[in-house]
Amino acid sequence: MKACIDIGGTKVAVGLAPAGDRPEILARQSEPTAKTGTPLALSAQILRLVDAACAAAGVDPAQVQSAGVSSAGPFVKQGGRIELATPNICGGLAGPARGLPNDWMSVPVEAPLAARFARLRVENDCVAALEAERRWGALQGVDDCAYVTWSTGIGVGLCVDGRVLRGKNGNAGHAGHSFVIDDREALCGCGNRGDVESLVAGNAIARRFGQDAAHWLGRASAGDAAAQDTVDGLCRILGRMLYNLVATLDLQCISLGGSVFWHHRAYLLPRLQAEVQAHFPALTQGVILAPAGLQDRVGDYAALALAPD
């Protein structure tokens, strides 16, 4: 058995998987992400959830020596080991204005988990989701592609010429912290003002417009004109980011997931596709936006795609 660990800004999920390449998750356990106490609270939570999954599956924890960790980023490295500098977990990045209950600047993950598991791989969650979508989902057989999540935050995993892009600290693809309009009001958890994530991420919509994404998208889908205007504005911003990815990397296909997108994909997908195709046909003609082939389980399978046998 191997452990599949998914760390998000809202929740942590842990499951077990048998050896081999089958996309199968057993005994899944999930809790809200630990954000109080010391920065080691998160790794302690993960190890406790691994033990709980083993108990639910009737597996001796000592037999689980392999783990894949799919985590929201960005990452920093301390002593060569990955720590999380994640805006929706680390309250010290943007300060008290964001309302997180800690002053953490980073959270150790790789070092405490490496002390527990003999074989461990930690990657950005969208890099992991990209690998899962290329193995089992909507990006199978595509060499120039991306996975984009529209969820609590905005994340991207990139593949060009069949090679997954990672960068010096594993942070390639953090286009959610890029700027596409001149807006200095919205505060991102990373400390930026006016980046893509601060404007359209799930946790930004309620702060900007007074109601959450489900409210605005539900009303827009029902035909409310004011809500449709609001959602069209969100799609313009995310659509510009998607276009920039296509224009920069000459992508063929982008797979989309995350809670904001997935629960309203029928409404959002054609609007995002139109935003991409509205610019420079030489770059965008034939580019496909597709719902994640692994549907709302992409986070689970992302961690599985990383776990060594």
Image: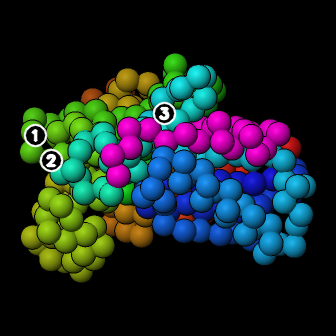
Q: Which residue is mark 1?
A: 183
What percent of the width, then of the height, locates residue 305? 71, 46
Extreme residue toward the front, this view: 37
Q: Is residue 106 above or below residue 271?
A: above
Q: Is residue 53 left or right of residue 13?
A: right
Examine the image and state in which quarter residue 284 appears. Answer: top left
Depth check, front residue: 157 or 46: 46
Does the residue at mark 1 contact the one at mark 2 (Cβ under 8 Å)? yes
Q: Secondary structure at mark 2?
A: loop
Question: Which residue corresponds to the image point at 66% horizontal and 42% vertical from the top-left?
Answer: 112
Q: At label 2, which amino acid type do we have? A: Ala
Residue 186's tag is 2
Q: At label 3, which amino acid type do we have? A: Phe
- Mark-to-mark CA distance, 1 and 3: 26 Å
Please tell me which of labels 2 and 3 falls first in the chain: 3
Placement of the C terminus among the 4 image quadrants: top right
Residues in magenta, as a range: 102-131
Q: At label 1, which amino acid type do we have? A: Asp
